[in-house]
Amino acid sequence: MKRLIAVLCLVLSGCAGQVVEQPGPQVVRVEVPVQIPCRIERVHRPAFAVDSLPIGADIGEQMRALRAERRQRQGYEARLEVVLAACQ
C-alpha cells in the first residue's frame, strides 16, 4: 500500500511540473450589420382623381374618377416598391 501511495505521489508531482502553454490573444474579425440611412429621392403622393371631384358629381363622373384613381394608385405603389427595394 505504501508503494502505491509513493507511485501516485510521483505521478501527480510529475503532472504538476508540466507547463501548459496558453495560446496568445488572437484577432478575430466579426462582421456586424450597421444601419445606414437610405439616400433615395422621396416618392410624392399624386393628386388622385377622386380628390378633385365636386361634391354633387353624378355617378358616371364618380366611376370614371374611381377607375382613373385605381390606375394612379397602382403606379404610385409600384414606385414605392422600387424605392423600398433599393433601400434594402
Image (cartoon, rainbow, N blue to C red):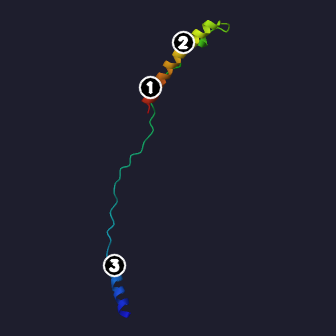
Give yes or no for contact between labels 2 and 1 (Cβ–Cβ under 8 Å).
no
Binning the other alpha carbons within 10 Å of mark 2 as few (below 14), some (14 to 19) or many (20 upward) gives some
Q: Nearer the viewer, mark 3 or mark 2?
A: 2
Residue located at (44% from left, 36% from top): 36
The correct choice, above or below, for 55 with respect to 24 in the image is above
Q: Quadrant of residue 47?
A: top right
Which residue is under mark 2? 68
Asked whether, in this view, residue 3 is left or right of residue 84, the answer is left
Question: Secondary structure under badge 1?
Answer: helix
Calculate the distance from the C-alpha at mark 2 to the C-alpha at mark 1.
22 Å
Pinpoint residue 66: horizontal percent, then vertical percent: 58, 13
Q: Secondary structure at mark 2?
A: helix
Of pointers 1 and 3, the one earlier in the residue sequence: 3
The amino acid marked with disc number 1 is Val
Which of pointers 2 and 1 indicates the residue nearer the eye? 2
> Which image quadrant: the N terminus?
bottom left
Q: 28 or 67: which is nearer to us?
A: 67
> Which numbered tag is attached to residue 82?
1
Residue at which label 3 appears: 15
Query: What's the residue type where badge 2 is placed?
Result: Ala
Q: Is residue 55 left or right of residue 27?
A: right
Q: Is residue 73 visible?
A: yes
Left or right position of 34 against 14: right
Q: Residue at x 61, y 10 (%)?
A: 62
Identify the image quadrant of the C terminus. Answer: top left
Instruction: State the SS at label 3.
Output: helix
